[in-house]
Image: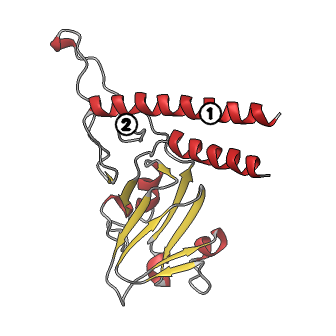
């Protein structure tokens, strides 16, 4: 029994070592973070923005609004469609709300002011699975791969900047250090796998 516990402990340690942290983003609702009735009669502006933004588990969305006169409600689809503010899943009214997505799937946000919701202050965010870590870079709809430049001798242009409406909340270091760290992590993972394999073999 003690051996099984040791093996499980080693397995948990190996999994923790082998799973690199991926970058997460904090998105400003609608691109500005201002939670209010959309201007110019464009009631779909929040959802138009959300449809062009890739949300992943671990990302967050920020809402800024006047406390006391507005709020952010998380509701189900039925309440979203009807702008029903009566029984929200969660309510935020501090004026500066940051909500982190911990699971994938659709999230329905509406204003706590029913009239504002009816005038377009509502948002659907579809969250995909966790962002994969790839040697210190993360995939995002706004961060495009570099394209070849004809005027610089076949060299690639520098990578695109981070997305304009999100901010990377995971610090990034020197690429050489990141590559060295990735190699070191792979070596540690291999060693951990060898130890676990040896321990499992000794149990048989």
Q: How far across and how far down the image is residue 197, in percent?
A: 69, 31
Disc 1 marks which residue? Answer: 195
Relative height, residue 30 to residue 175 (above, below): below
Tag 2's secondary structure? loop
For disc 2, the neighbor class at 10 Å (few under 14, some 14 to 19, many from 20) is: some
Q: Nearer the viewer, residue 62 or 196?
A: 196
Q: How far across and how far down the image is residue 184, in percent?
A: 41, 31
For discs 2 and 1, the disc positioned in front in the rendered view: 1
- For marks 2 and 1, the one nearer the N-term is 2
> In the displayed structure, does residue 176 sit left or right of residue 107?
left
> In the displayed structure, does residue 83 sit left or right of residue 166?
right
Disc 2 marks which residue? Answer: 137
The structure residue drawn at horizontal position 46% and vertical position 84%, both measured from the top left corner, is 113
Q: How far across and how far down the image is residue 111, in percent?
A: 46, 78
**Real-space CA distance between mark 2 and mark 1, rounded to the nearest whole angstrom:** 30 Å
- How is the structure coloured here? secondary structure
Relative height, residue 120 to residue 173 (above, below): below
Tag 1's secondary structure? helix
The structure residue drawn at horizontal position 60% and vertical position 77%, both measured from the top left corner, is 89
**Displayed quadrant of residue 97:** bottom left
In the displayed image of the protein, which residue is found farthest to the bottom? 68
**Displayed quadrant of residue 36:** bottom left
């Amino acid at each position: 029994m003690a051996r099984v516990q040791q093996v499980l402990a080693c397995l948990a340690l190996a999994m923790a070592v082998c799973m690199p942290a991926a970058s997460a983003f904090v998105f400003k609702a609608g691109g500005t973070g201002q939670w209010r009735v959309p201007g110019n009669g464009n009631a779909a502006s929040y959802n138009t923005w959300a449809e062009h933004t890739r949300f992943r588990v671990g990302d967050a969305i920020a809402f800024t609004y006047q406390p006391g006169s507005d709020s952010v409600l998380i509701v189900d689809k039925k309440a979203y469609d009807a702008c029903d503010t009566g029984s929200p899943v969660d309510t935020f009214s501090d004026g500066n709300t940051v909500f982190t997505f911990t699971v994938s799937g659709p999230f329905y946000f509406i204003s706590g002011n029913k009239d504002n919701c009816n005038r377009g202050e509502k948002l659907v965010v579809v969250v995909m699975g966790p962002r994969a870590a790839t040697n210190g870079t993360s995939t995002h709809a706004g961060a495009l791969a570099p394209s070849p430049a004809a005027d610089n001798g076949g060299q690639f242009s520098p990578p695109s900047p981070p997305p304009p409406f999100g901010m990377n909340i995971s610090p990034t270091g020197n690429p050489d250090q990141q590559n060295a760290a990735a190699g070191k992590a792979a070596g540690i993972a291999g060693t951990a796998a060898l130890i676990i394999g040896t321990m499992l073999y000794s149990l048989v």
